[in-house]
Image: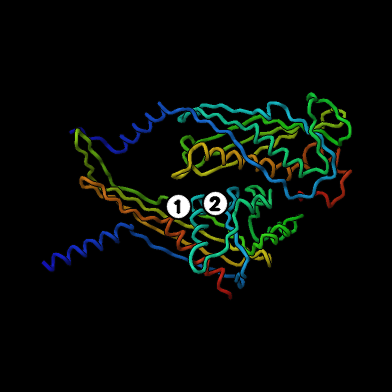
Amino acid sequence: MPVYNLNKILQLIVSLALITGCARSVTVLSDFPEPVVEPLPLAVGIRYPAELAEYVHVKDPMMDAEWTIRLGEANMKMFRALFAGMFDEMVELEGTTAGEGAAGVDIIIEPKLEELEFTVPRQSGNDQYTVWLLYNLRILSPEGSLISDWRVTAYGQQDEGSMGTSAEESMKAAAITALRDAAASIILGFPSAPGVETHLLPKQTPETDQAG
Amino acid sequence: MRSAKYATNILIIALALAAGGCMTTRIEETKDVSTGIKKGETVVILASSYHSTNPAEDSFIDCLSNAVRGGRTGLNLHPASEFRDALFPWLEPRTAPTGVDDLPGLLQRPGVRERVRARDIRYIIWIEGDTERKNSGGSLSCAAGPGAAACFGLAWWENLSSYEATVWDLDDGVASGKVSTSVNGTSVVPALIIPLPFIARTQAAACKGLSKQLRSFIVETG
């Protein structure tokens, strides 16, 4: 009777599962709460680029199946809730092109997701799914001249699912945590973002700086 | 005949004891100020931020949340996710208070105290800690053939589950104290044809011990 080591059998099963395993796909859907902050006394125009609303990340990491992460809808929901709570007035500049000016606003913000990176437990050797996001918030004057490119990083992690939780659900939870982290980072950092302080803070009173 | 019956009973008891694995539990409590909870007041259990401490696993938070609700002295538990949303973004990993010194700052933020009061939340319980493998050894091999399979050998491992709960009183804006638990357990899987797993469920034991102590910590005044 042939004798096999239990570990070898398990390794063989895992390898076969990887070879024949199908690709993984996650559509991140979530509602985001409006932040509990005193709104800044600014009228802000937001221009969402199409690639933010339709953002899809596809990657085939080593030692794992190919992952497709659709973040577009969650991106939009996060930014809409965030900016609605952050500013006194917020208008979406639909049908305008990047860099174009707008009347009746103090500044224009064009958010863009520049990078998404993730790791799975098999790569990192721990039991965490992690998601890392890099946004660029392009801040423009009402005339359309560039005030600054403000880069914001965000991070989320989620335990590997125990029984009943799929890998996709864990990745989705990590992405939602990262999106919430991005919102927190923007709220904390906006008053001191490059160019914002010099252009806009003189218009504010000290008690409106809630990020303290 | 009678001695055979005794031997069988002893064997059953030994197996029943062994099936739970071998565990030692230590629970400690430090109360800094008097506690107590009124009817209608609630508590919320949150994992510490992964930016600053050693956050507990989601499975442990789930277990503890279910356990503190149960029993005669069960607490009214407010859902953690709703509370995080209500205070967004001030309980996110990046922004959550890292010590009781940050609590007054949190409560002074616009709208925060009102939202805490609206939910009758009296205590926040922050949980940190984890379960880790301390040691392992032995060897277990299985053989399989047409119509037959068998395992031989012995494998063992030792787990340590250490968790700490820090209780903040939101009414007074102070730290009420800490409750900690540490459970060490050794699991063994001997196999002579059929493997017999005797698993020490250290995390479950830590959850049970911590929840019981937390309930008495909060409910009992003084």
Residue B221 image point, x, y percent: 58, 74
Report which quarter residue A48 is drawn in.
top right
- Farthest left residue in view: B1
Q: Quadrant of the N terminus of chain A?
A: top left
Q: Is residue B78 left or right of residue A36?
A: left
> Crowdedness of circle 1 by 10 Å Cα count: few (<14), some, many (20+)?
some
Q: Which mark is residue B131?
A: 1
**Horizontal arrangement in the rendering, residue A7 relative to residue A167 (left or right):** left
User: Could you give the CA–CA distance between mark 1 and mark 2, rounded to whole angstroms?
Assistant: 11 Å
**Residue displayed at 72% across by 59% down:** B113
Of the residues shown, which amino acid type is indicated by label 2?
Pro
Crowdedness of circle 2 by 10 Å Cα count: few (<14), some, many (20+)? many
Q: Nearer the viewer, residue B122 or B190?
A: B122
Mark sitting earlier along the chain (1/2): 2
**Residue B55: numbered disc:** 2
Q: Amino acid at mark 1?
A: Thr
